[in-house]
Image (spheres, grey):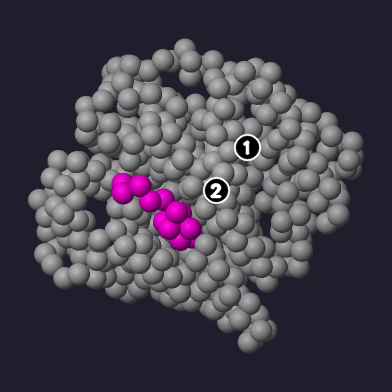
């Protein structure tokens, strides 16, 4: 199978598993919104969960995966599977020791950490203390999820993508179960949110448990004793530190947003969180899936010195990412009000919370394409062992986000924080591409990429305008009941898909063939 075929197949597997995870994730968010709305309990949980979640994105999905996979691939190609397994076993044991220390420090330092990320909570002692308690319960989740990320890297290089991609389903099911049990056991909101925090910890344990039997069947024994060091881990460490900045700018920006949002009106953190969750749906199902699939392929091609293959794989990943995320951007912008009213508009999540979240979604969504493309572009730099450039670009993007957030949060409140994330993400991606072109790292066919973007952009614009006109006809006053929100969302999704793919066919977009191949593979199973 060609590398393009491998990327397509892997992206299809990861995307399907991620889609299932996002469905359960929505159920989790729906139940959470029903119980806690956009009030102080929701703000406390989201702020506390943001800490281990950011560390997960920062160290697990970001730096750990992106630095481990190329080194593991090179060791496997050069020295064989037995030596590669020795290296992976040492990495797993060393990481376990480091994470245990980090977890203990995090639990003890929770009051200072909460003070740093949610300074505005200090004016409400009860809210602050609850956030500290929730943080202490959930902090050990970092241990489980970072080990899951390492297992994911091993399995992805070996060609297995399903178990790691399905792992988040376990987290969502554990959190849903904890909410249901808490709702049955007690009517006290604070006790219920504590149940939810324990559900996060249980979910992390279940995620790790899913990887162990799959690795065992491939001859890798997770709990086998042995050394905690391997010479190749030095290379992983050298790549990992800059990768923290290069691959996780978006998460750092979200962290900054949470910190600043704590200074705004109650509900601002919750509105930003649920808006981000909706942006994460297409980001996870498509962009992250493609980035996950591209990294092992780029690593194999670099190990084989196949620069032409590297250029082709990266170009394909970038074009396909934009083909999917540009219409997703248009769809989220146009459908934001009925979509949020349908998904969350019940119980304690009232009309004001819907409007607050919809405003945040608008400004997050405009940067979706850039956030997605960064996920494909950064692995290319690390395939070339270029650790400096992503760091330099990341630092510039983070500085830009902080400056824009402080500038915009006054006149635009939480909307300004969302817009700052989008603008800094655009700057991050465009600067990475500019430096890629300037340095001539790979010989890309920039003409075909620009033509592909023009086609996808034109089809997305036509689709967005048509769906918007339909929504004006369906709900001229802009108000949504559950029924009208369901009808409007169903119309928008169906009409949007038909119009976009119809326009793509008329424009002869080659990426449409890839979509058809993924669908045909699913039907053939």
Q: Position of residue 216 (x, y in %)?
A: 30, 64
Q: Is residue 166 magenta?
A: yes
Q: Nearer the viewer, residue 90 or 125?
A: 90
Q: Is residue 350 left or right of residue 477?
A: left
Quarter of the image containing the N terminus?
top left
Q: Nearer the viewer, residue 450 or 252?
A: 450
What is the number of the mark on residue 525? 2
Element at badge 1?
Answer: helix
Q: Position of residue 500 (x, y in %)?
A: 69, 29
Instruction: Identify residue for label 1.
Output: 328
Q: Position of residue 77 (x, y in %)?
A: 19, 41
Label 2 CA crowd tier, 10 Å (few <14, some 14–19, many 20+): few
Q: Quadrant of residue 181?
A: bottom right
What span is colored magenta in the figure? 157-168
Q: Is residue 313 magenta?
A: no
Residue drawn at 55 percent across, 22 percent down:
510
Marks 2 and 1 sit apart, C-alpha to C-alpha, by 27 Å
């Amino acid at each position: 199978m060609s590398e393009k075929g491998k990327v397509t197949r892997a992206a299809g597997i990861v995307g399907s598993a991620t889609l299932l995870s996002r469905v359960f994730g929505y159920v989790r968010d729906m139940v959470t919104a029903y119980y806690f709305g956009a009030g102080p309990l929701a703000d406390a949980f989201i702020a506390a969960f943001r800490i281990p979640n950011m560390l997960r994105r920062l160290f697990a999905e970001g730096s750990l995966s992106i630095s481990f996979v190329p080194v593991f691939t090179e060791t496997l190609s050069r020295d064989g599977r037995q030596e590669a397994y020795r290296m992976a076993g040492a990495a797993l044991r060393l990481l376990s020791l480091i994470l245990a220390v980090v977890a203990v420090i995090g639990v003890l330092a929770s009051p200072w950490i909460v003070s740093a990320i949610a300074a505005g909570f200090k004016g409400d002692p009860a809210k602050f203390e609850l956030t500290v308690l929730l943080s202490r319960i959930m902090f050990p989740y970092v241990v489980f999820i970072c080990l899951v990320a390492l297992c994911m890297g091993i399995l992805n290089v070996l060609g297995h993508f399903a178990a790691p991609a399905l792992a988040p389903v376990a987290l969502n099911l554990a959190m849903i179960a904890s909410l249901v049990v808490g709702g049955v056991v007690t009517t006290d909101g604070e006790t219920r949110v504590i149940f939810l925090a324990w559900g996060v910890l249980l979910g992390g344990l279940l995620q790790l448990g899913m990887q162990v039997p799959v690795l065992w069947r491939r001859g890798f024994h997770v709990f086998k004793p042995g050394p905690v060091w391997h010479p190749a881990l030095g290379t992983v460490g050298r790549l990992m530190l800059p990768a923290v900045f290069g691959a996780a700018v978006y998460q750092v920006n979200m962290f900054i947003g949470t910190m600043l949002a704590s200074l705004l009106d109650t509900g601002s953190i919750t509105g930003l969180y649920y808006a981000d969750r909706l942006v994460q749906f297409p980001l996870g199902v498509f962009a992250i899936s493609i980035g996950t699939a591209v990294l092992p392929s780029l690593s194999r091609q670099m190990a084989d010195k196949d620069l032409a293959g590297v250029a082709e794989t990266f170009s394909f990943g970038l074009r396909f990412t934009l083909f999917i995320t540009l219409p997703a951007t248009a769809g989220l912008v146009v459908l934001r009000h009925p979509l949020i009213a349908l998904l969350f508009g019940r119980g304690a999540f009232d009309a004001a919370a819907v409007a607050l979240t919809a405003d945040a979604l608008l400004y997050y969504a405009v940067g979706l394409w850039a956030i997605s493309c960064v996920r494909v572009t950064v692995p290319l730099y690390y395939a070339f062992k270029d650790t400096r450039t992503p760091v330099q670009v990341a630092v510039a993007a983070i500085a830009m986000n902080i400056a824009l957030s402080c500038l915009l949060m006054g006149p635009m409140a939480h909307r300004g924080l969302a817009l700052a994330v989008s603008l800094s993400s655009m700057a991050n991606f465009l600067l990475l591409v500019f430096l890629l072109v300037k340095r001539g790292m790979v010989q890309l066919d920039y003409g075909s990429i620009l033509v592909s973007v023009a086609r996808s952009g034109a089809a997305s614009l036509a689709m967005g305008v048509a769906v918007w006109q339909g929504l004006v006809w369906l709900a001229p006053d802009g108000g949504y009941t559950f029924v009208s929100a369901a009808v409007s969302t169903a119309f928008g999704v169906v009409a949007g898909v038909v119009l976009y793919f119809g326009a793509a066919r008329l424009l002869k977009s080659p990426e449409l063939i890839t979509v058809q191949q993924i669908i045909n593979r699913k039907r053939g199973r």
